[in-house]
Amino acid sequence: MPFDEDAAPPVLQGGVFRWAAPLGEVRPEWVDGYRHMNMGFYLVAFDAQTDRLWPHLRLGTALRESGLGTFAAEAWLDYQREMTEGMPIGAESEVLGCDAKRLLVRHRMFHWNEGWTSSAHEVLYLCVDLAARRVSTWPGAVRARLEEVATGAPPKRLMLGRRA
């Protein structure tokens, strides 16, 4: 999904990025034999949410055009309540923390109309030099933006630093 940098911006409330429109809906091809959203498509939806968030963190087209990008290094996903075909998908995002080369984000998926949580997704992203395909440091303006919006909330499963 390309970055939609002209879309309506989210509102930042209590450190959480919230949109005035749903992310989409559960598509027929995303539903499995149990008549609910197949687990792999939760990741597809969360990836679309990442693309929706990136421009608001200065991680969109301008970063890519500078030769940098983001790669997911580690991810954790939980399933709390099933989503079924046609349900409207709401999604919101929170930047938990960052350092010189890493970014930790939590997304929440919910039923757009009813508000109940369906799933949560934590992702550790790396800043990557796209030509060298190596980890790099965030540009100064990007790092400043990430630090500005980071809540410092504890992750449920992942961590920003290396494990001992």
Image: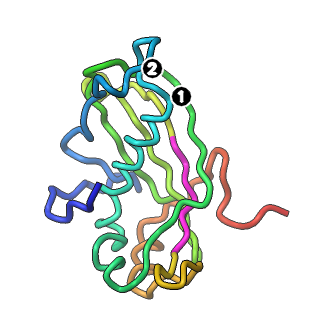
Q: Is residue 88 visible?
A: yes
Is 16 placed left or right of 161 in the picture? Answer: left
Residue 99 image-quadrant placement: bottom right
Q: Position of residue 51 (x, y in %)?
A: 33, 57
In the depicted view, which residue is nearer to us: 153 or 142? 142
The residue singled out by tag 2 in the image is 82
Which region shows up in magenta? 121-127
| Quadrant occupied by the C terminus | bottom right
The residue singled out by tag 1 in the image is 79
Q: Label the magenta part by its dominant secondary structure.
A: strand
Residue found 39% across the figure and 25% down from its top:
116
Asked if marks 1 and 2 touch (Cβ < 8 Å), the reply is: yes
Q: Amino acid at mark 2?
A: Glu
Is 159 placed left or right of 110 in the picture? Answer: right
Residue found 37% across the figure and 41% down from its top:
45
Q: Is residue 42 magenta?
A: no
The residue furthest right is 164
